[in-house]
Image (cartoon, helix red, strand yellow):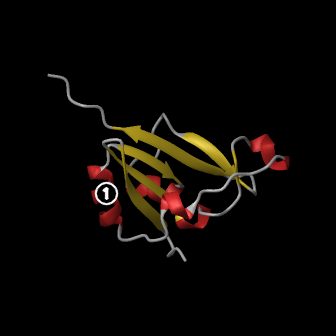
């Protein structure tokens, strides 16, 4: 079972290190892509991708600094990483219609 706060997992994929991180309360909970979708089939964040273990905020920050790709879901995770208010934030909705922030990041190679 996930600890309170957040969970994260690093994946190695095609030369990238992918960080999947989410508020632990969101893993397995029904989420919707649009606020008006409450009557449609929800989707869930899978523990196999987002992980079942958390750590300290410092552990999350260290994992994010190593990752070349990030998939970040939830106010706690995004706040810990200092990304609250990022203009590229997308939003999902929980079963009560509350917004759930979602950010994706990628590190591009430096140009010579």
Task: Give the residue at x 50% y 57%.
Answer: 49
Q: Quadrant of the C terminus?
A: top left
Which one is in front, 35 or 62? 62
Task: Give the residue at x 49% y 43%.
Answer: 103
Q: Quadrant of the N terminus?
A: bottom right
Name above or below for residue 44 compared with residue 6: above
Q: What x and y, as percent, mark residue 44?
A: 65, 56
Which one is in front, 72 or 99? 72
> In this view, which residue lies farthest toward the top?
112
Q: What x and y, as percent, mark residue 110?
A: 20, 29
Name above or below for residue 21 compared with residue 86: below
Q: What x and y, as percent, mark residue 101?
A: 56, 47
* Residue carrying label 1: 63
> In this view, which residue lies farthest toward the right?
39
Q: Is residue 36 left or right of residue 62?
A: right
Name above or below for residue 68 compared with residue 66: above
Disc 1 element: helix
The 10 Å Cα crowd at callout 1, few under 14, some 14 to 19, many 20 or more, is many
């Amino acid at each position: 079972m996930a600890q309170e706060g957040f969970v994260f997992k690093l994946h190695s994929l095609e030369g990238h290190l992918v960080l999947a991180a989410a508020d632990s309360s969101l893993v397995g909970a029904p989420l919707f892509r649009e606020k008006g979708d409450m009557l449609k089939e929800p989707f869930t964040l899978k523990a196999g991708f987002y992980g079942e273990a958390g750590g300290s905020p410092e552990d999350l920050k260290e994992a994010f600094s190593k990752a070349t790709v990030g998939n970040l879901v939830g106010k706690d995770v995004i706040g810990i990483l200092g990304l609250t208010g990022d203009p590229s934030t997308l939003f999902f909705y929980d079963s009560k219609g509350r917004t759930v922030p979602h950010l994706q990041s990628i590190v591009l190679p430096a140009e010579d």
